[in-house]
Amino acid sequence: MTPDNENLDHLVLFAVADDYEKFEMIASDITKRMSLIVNIPDIDKIEYALLKAIANKDVNAYEYSEITHQYISADIDSHQISTFWFYITDQGKKRLELLDTR
């Protein structure tokens, strides 16, 4: 893993650490942060890092129910990524803590 990819993985976890977030907000947050330190990654790299975090069980995907006004865990594929909300898992919080102590 290159330092850029590792930094991007870290920023994905950081972006979903405090609240449920839509993909557009995650991408916007990462773009702003990375523009200060390195070249801005393209949206496909951010999407890949988010999908990898989901596969690693560091982040969960949710759908918001207008009926119950609750977030419901959901399966995801990249074609629908913009319709979901994302939130860090306990495992992801531990990984983020480890990354932050480096």
Image: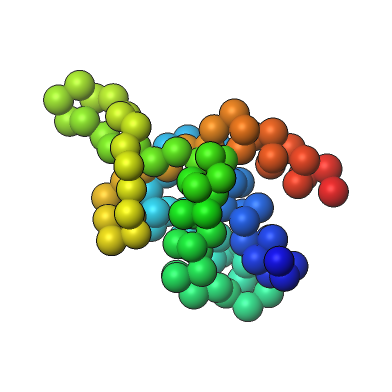
For the view shown, which residue lies furthest in the bottom direction? 39
Asked whether residue 16 is in view, the answer is no
Give above or below for 82 relative to 74. Answer: below
Q: Which residue lies furthest to the top in this view?
A: 68
Question: Looking at the picture, how far across and down is residue 30, in whole percent?
Answer: 55, 60
Q: Is residue 40 left or right of residue 97?
A: left
Residue drawn 20% across and 21% down? 68
Instruction: State whether residue 12 is above or below residue 16.
Output: below
Q: Residue 47 at what x, y percent from top left?
A: 45, 62
22 vs 49, left or right, is left
Q: Is residue 46 above or below residue 62?
A: below
- Whether residue 40 sits left or right of residue 61 in the image: it is right
Residue at the extreme left: 67
Residue at the outermost front position: 55
Residue at 51% over, 69% down = 45
**Location of residue 44 (image quadrant):** bottom left
Instruction: Give me the residue at 49% from left, 74% from top.
Output: 42
Where residue 89 appears, as percent x and y from the top left, is 54, 33
Tell me the quadrant of the picture where the N terminus can be found: bottom right
The x, y position of residue 11, in whole percent, is: 61, 54
| Residue 10 can be seen, yes or no | yes
Q: How many marks?
A: 0
The residue lying toward the viewer, choosing from 34 and 7, is 7
Scheme by which the image is coloured = rainbow
Residue at image location 61% in from the left, 71% down from the top: 35
Task: Give residue 78's quadrant in the image.
Answer: bottom left
Q: In this view, does 90 lie above or below 88?
A: above
Depth check, front residue: 35 or 76 = 76
